């Protein structure tokens, strides 16, 4: 199928928007905002996320456009980080200062640009993860590893503090590894779960992601033990069959109630769910034999 550059960029940007809408529309999601619950949040609801998604959508097309060229992956990464800053400002303006999608901007921006670069170079779908690695090579070393001088400074970033305290690389470590939690775990499960309705399929995949995700958003207000608890409970739910069994569904509802009461919101896992959906759309797109004129 021959399509032009503009059609490719429009398709990728549209996939990103739709993936974000899929994520926020799924329920029940333990501690997270859904159409029927504010989760563990008191400052945001479903419509806050719709407003945020609307504000970010134009930037999704820009991320794709920046990736669709001859520049090196690292040069592309530098260019989209500047776009990401503008996207974040737009989000905060639309949500009146509420951070709904900061992690999503980072993740989706990188994934979009890497996907566009893959198609530009006429590479196979599997190359996306390698381009993500090339784009973000050294990001942990450059942005998280704390030298002796940094250890005594007072204005450490949140990511630096978590790395220093727990050794957690967070989302930077995930992208530097090519987002394996999506490509190796979440995407295969999402594909195998196509017999479920879309809402159930999304929740099932989210619980899988929560089983393995080093979700630093959980640590904003909670301890490392809370993160381990989330992972353990999620693995237990998956061992029960997830949304495919009565006992699994009951445990998801129970965990949602607990997280809402305890103020636990695995936003990082939610972002990775949206990336999983986006990548599934992209895989079908590339499978169709997309070639650009």
Image (cartoon, rainbow, N blue to C red):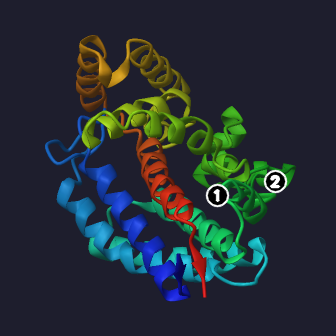
Viewer-proximal residue among 15 and 7: 7
Looking at this view, name the residue that lies furthest to the front: 1
Viewer-proximal residue among 131 and 154: 131
Residue in view at x 24 percent, y 34 percent? 28
Q: How crowded is mark 2: few (under 14 residues within 10 Å), some or many (20 or more)?
A: few
Q: Is residue 146 left or right of residue 248?
A: right
Which quadrant of the figure has residue 11? Answer: bottom left
Q: Is residue 43 left or right of residue 185?
A: left
Tell me the element at label 1: loop
Viewer-proximal residue among 259 and 60: 60
Tell me the element at label 2: helix
Q: Is residue 197 above or below residue 226?
A: below
Foreground tag (1 vs 2): 1
Residue 100 in view: no
Residue annotated with mark 1: 125
Residue 141 is marked as 2
Q: In which quarter of the image is the C terminus?
A: bottom right
Q: In this view, does 205 lie above or below 118?
A: above
């Amino acid at each position: 199928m021959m399509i032009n550059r503009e059609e490719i960029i429009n398709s990728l940007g549209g996939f990103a928007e739709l993936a974000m809408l899929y994520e926020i529309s799924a329920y029940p999601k333990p501690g997270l905002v859904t159409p029927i619950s504010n989760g563990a949040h008191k400052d945001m609801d479903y419509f806050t996320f719709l407003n945020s998604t609307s504000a970010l959508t134009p930037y999704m097309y820009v991320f794709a456009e920046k990736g669709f060229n001859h520049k090196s992956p690292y040069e592309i990464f530098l260019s989209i980080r500047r776009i990401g800053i503008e996207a974040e400002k737009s989000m905060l303006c639309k949500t009146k200062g509420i951070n709904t999608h900061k992690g999503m901007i980072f993740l989706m921006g990188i994934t979009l640009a890497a996907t566009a670069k893959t198609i530009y170079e006429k590479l196979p779908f599997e190359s996306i993860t390698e381009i993500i690695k090339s784009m973000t090579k050294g990001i942990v070393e450059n942005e998280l590893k704390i030298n002796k001088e940094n250890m005594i400074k007072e204005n450490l970033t949140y990511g630096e503090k978590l790395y220093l305290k727990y050794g957690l690389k967070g989302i930077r470590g995930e992208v530097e590894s090519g987002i394996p939690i999506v490509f190796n775990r979440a995407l295969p499960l999402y594909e195998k779960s196509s017999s479920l309705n879309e809402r159930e399929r999304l929740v099932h995949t989210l619980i899988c992601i929560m089983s393995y995700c080093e979700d630093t958003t959980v640590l904003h207000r909670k301890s490392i033990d809370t993160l381990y608890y989330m992972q353990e409970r999620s693995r237990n739910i998956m061992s029960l069959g997830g949304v495919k069994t009565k006992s699994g569904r009951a445990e998801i509802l129970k965990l949602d109630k607990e997280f809402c009461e305890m103020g636990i919101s695995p936003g990082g896992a939610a972002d990775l769910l949206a990336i999983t959906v986006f990548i599934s759309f992209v895989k079908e797109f590339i499978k169709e034999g997309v070639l650009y004129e």
